[in-house]
Amino acid sequence: MVTGAELEAAAADSAGSFVGPRKKPFTHRGEPCKNCGTPLEGWYCYACGQNADTHHRSILHLIWEAIEGMFHLDGRLANTLPLLFFRPGKLAKDYMEGRIVRHVPPFRTFLVALLLFIFAAEHLIHNVRHQQELKEEREAAQLATPQGRKVKADEIRKDAAESRRERLADAAATREEDLKEEDADKAKIAQDYAADVKKAETRYAERVAEADALEKNVNAGAEALAKVHGKSGRVAATVRGLDFQSPETLEAGANTLADAQIAGGHVNIVGPDAKTKAAIKAEAAKPGHSGKHWSGEWFKERIAKAIENPDYYTLVLFGWAHRLAVLLLPIIGLSLALVYLNKRQYFIYDHLLVATNLLSFSFLTWALVFVLPGALAGPFLAIVLLWTPINLFQTLRGGYGSSVVGALLKTLIVWSMTVIAFASLLIALMLFTLSQM
């Protein structure tokens, strides 16, 4: 008598013949398995599970096996990803309650998400740098024409006028604040104000003169292109020349570093007021204060080397990024253990499983932000910034069974600890990379 299960199996096998390739008949019955020597009864050894096929594959098949092995592109991926993005609480609960075989292993998902995040971040950095280089080269080409030089000179004059207006407004505001103080030295305040006004007017005149000279310079295009190619060396030299003990020198150096355009385009850095400058100088003049200690020579030299060799700096940075990113797992896991300290049924292993899901979601969404075109990246970034804490809330609410209020409070704690940990690791990574320059 044929059972219902046999009928279902026969129907499934018949349907499979229409949607997929027909399997070859098994002709190796009784032959020893090449792995363990057990006599074969079918395509897979019942003792060790190895495929009895000859394992001769085409190049395309080998490539597909490599991709499938790395990203685990099977039915479990279709089960895992929707839950990871839209029902993270259910995914966390499945993992913690042992329903694992239906999903991609969590640490595998984490590693793939981290890999995609690193690739996307590298793509973003290289793309931004490349676009900036193209923009500077286009501007240099425009300066080779009289019309282009006039447009650029007019931009410089406009920026100079705006900068002068801001400086004069800041100087007036500082004077008003100083005059409100008791026993204010009006003569000294007037003197400082006059010095600030003179400085603003002098800077304005210099910028206008630069614009006039640019408009008349027929070699401006070639000179600008030469500046583009030698920009790294000039910026590095400026960094090495920064003096942290002199507010005036530091402000001038900062203005040079902020010069984001070629041929005189300038982003003005407003320096400290007279009172702040006096305080800085007084602090530096105190007995026992070592100017050399605060000069930042080590830091300046490393920054300059990073500017001179941006590709090497990026290589080292991303070479260590994935290592430090793994440290986020125990940090988030321990933060989850802290907020659920009263729930003894959950172990560190459970918290680490949840941490892998949270980080996988974050890495995948941020990777998408990095690769999207500029017009779409901004709106999607806003969505991600809102979506990430909501995803965390859903995880705690559904995975741990927290109440709405409890999940909100725990989300705030875990979210804050995660942001602080990520920022700290990022700063540590950048400083460590500088130390390798």
Image (cartoon, helix red, strand yellow):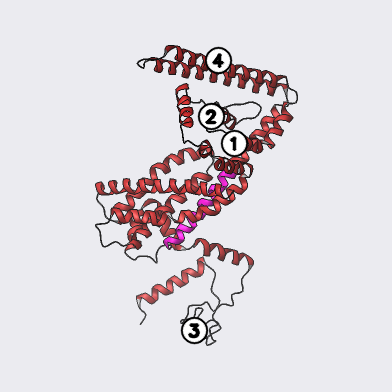
Predominant secondary structure in magenta? Answer: helix
Q: Is residue 240 left or right of residue 362?
A: right
Camera-near label (3 vs 4) is: 4
Residue identifier under label 3 = 41
Q: CA distance from mark 4 to mark 1?
A: 27 Å
Dot 4: what SS? helix
Q: Earlier in the sequence, mark 1 or mark 3?
A: 3
Q: What's the CA distance linking mark 3 and mark 2? A: 85 Å
Which residue shows up at 44% across the image and 47% down it?
424
Real-space Cα distance between discs 1 and 2? 14 Å
Label located before the other in sequence (3 or 2): 3
Where residue 147 appears, x then y in whole percent? 70, 21
Whether residue 302 sits left or right of residue 138 in the image: it is: left
Q: Residues within 10 Å of mark 1 (few under 14, many from 20)?
A: many
Instruction: Look at discs 1 and 3 and give the one toward the viewer.
Output: 1
Amino acid at the residue labelled 1: Val
Q: Earlier in the sequence, mark 3 or mark 4?
A: 3
Amino acid at dot 4: Lys
The part of the chain drawn in magenta is: 104-126
Few, some or many C-alpha atoms within 10 Å of disc 4 (few <14, some 14-19, many ≥20)? few
Disc number at residue 246? 2
- Give the answer, above or below, for where 89 lies relative to 235: below
Label 4 sits on residue: 198
The reply to whether dot 3 and dot 4 touch (C-beta < 8 Å) is no
First along the sequence among labels 4 and 1: 4
Q: CA distance from mark 1 to mark 3?
A: 74 Å
**Residue type highlighted by circle 3:** Glu
* Disc 2 + disc 4, Cβ < 8 Å: no
Q: Residue at x 60, y 44 (%)?
A: 126
Quadrant containing the N terminus in the rendered view: bottom left
> Is residue 83 something that shows in the picture?
no
